[in-house]
Image: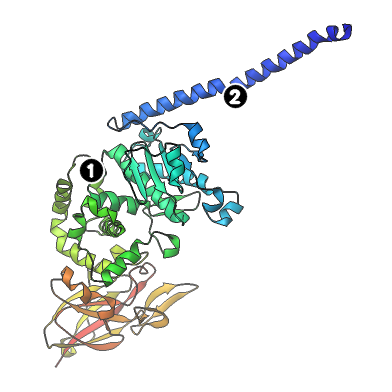
Amino acid sequence: MLLVTWRSPILTERVLFLWTLTVVLLVACGFSPAIAVQRDVNEEASRQRSMQRINPGMPRPMKIDPQRVAAAGISIFRGKHITLYTDVRAEISGNQEAIGNQADPRQRWVELFDAAVPLWCERFDIDRSDAKDYSLSAIVMQDKVRFQQARLIPDDLPKFPAGYSRGHEFWMYAQPDDYYTRHLMLHEGTHAFMNWFKGSTGPPWYSEGMAEWVALHQWDGQGLELAAKIASVNDSKGWGRIGRIRKMVADKQAMSLEEVLNIPPSAFRAVKYYAWSWAACEFLSEHPLSARAFARLPDLVDVSELQISFNLSFVEALKPHRETLDRDWALFINELDYGYDVRAARLTKAEPVPVATKLNNATGFKISASQSWQSTGMRIGQGDRFGISAVGEIVVGKTTKPWVSQAEGITIDYYSGQPLGKLMACVVPENLSQDDVAKVRPVDTIAVGRTSEVTGSGVLWLRVNESPARLRDNSGHLEVSIFKLK
């Protein structure tokens, strides 16, 4: 008893000292539960005030009960600009290689979104400092019932097949392919960003087309590229818009630019209209005659509430070039492929060159291997016969060394059933309309090679046989002589 009494003050003093030191350290490090909770509350209140300054017209955020979320088996992942709520498990949310490297795909979705915000700022001309407190809640679902139990789905939320964005939140269903899940997240993120910072997303074709176009991405976990050029179907598993357009063109259900610009809101219950809206944004953003007017459209969405006023302004800007754009749109949709190069695939004028002989009043042209169809401007009347001859060498691809071809082409590869690099011809109506699209399809072209004869009624076009998606590594030209036959 005396021993205990004698040591008790010392033990008590030590315990008090250690307890006090622990509390001080926890407080200093921000680990005090009460202080941490209050800090989170203060930070959230500050963030919401900043968000409301971005756009005072936005509704208040959805109230979320963390206990209900946890009880429903929903995981939470927090980033700088996003809080992710999902019932997707790590083992089914990405590829096994990523999981083996301890890279949880759900955390990568958060990192993807955080990486996208500065790129959205750049694309829509928003100062990054204005978006420093920008943050959304993302609800990525497999089992909808879980989220209903957690009250993460408001009663007034409309039904949606893939994703929906509103105010501080967006909702989406996880997809079988990780790429398409990421694409949908960026798609809804684009809608949300435009609504918050531009005040609107514009008419249906532009709203959905921009979200589809911007959401196409390249992402290696470090660097992110939005509105990326997708080289193959393997780079965008689950997306499928190009295949859908190809099928509709083959079934003679192609849409004109005019039809795309006037797609009504109700039409977007069908996936095909997302495909056509994306195609319009892809085409108009890259074509030299529309790129500048298209780039100005984000500044019109907040001042043009009605689709008709937005479209009228845009159509008026395109008016001087509308005939050319409609023609090149026809070319675009007929040979649409992954990696399609709009600038290189549009119709250009063939460059005239002198010919060595004036036999039969021959006319000479230089046909570039890095450009698709090139118009000679020569009109062929009904019953006329013209001869064509070509000389020169071109490069039509590169692997370990350049693929060099002459006008007959090289059989190392084929496009549309003909050797790569072969000189091709097509006689098209003088004023190409949407109804004349079939006349410039690859299957209706004439294989010229070194020499050939062409007939028809219309204007003569020439090109080197190559996919419009693979023109970037081509170089050189063929010199072509054209002469009338008796």
Determine whether, in the image, residue 355 is placed left or right of residue 410.
Answer: left
Determine whether, in the image, residue 368 is placed left or right of residue 431.
Answer: right
Residue 368 marker: none
Disc 2 secondary structure class: helix
For the N terminus, the image quarter is top right
- In the image, residue 239 sits, relative to residue 79, either above or below, namely below
Label 2 neighbourhood size at 10 Å, few (<14), some (14-19), many (20+)?
few
Q: Position of residue 96 (x, y in %)?
A: 57, 56
* N-term mark: 1 or 2: 2
Disc 1 secondary structure class: loop
Q: In which quarter of the image is residue 334?
A: bottom left
- Amino acid type of the residue that numbered disc 1 sits on in the rendered structure: Val
Of residues 102 and 176, the one nearer the viewer is 176
Give the CA distance from mark 1 to mark 2.
46 Å
Q: In which quarter of the image is residue 360?
A: bottom left
Residue at 44% x, 54% y is 175
Residue 29 marker: 2
Label 1 neighbourhood size at 10 Å, few (<14), some (14-19), many (20+)?
many
Tell me the residue that label 1 is attached to.
301
- Amino acid type of the residue that numbered disc 2 sits on in the rendered structure: Cys
Residue at 88% x, 9% y is 3
Q: Position of residue 132 (x, y in %)?
A: 40, 33
Of residues 220 and 292, the one nearer the viewer is 220
Of residues 361 and 446, the one nearer the viewer is 446
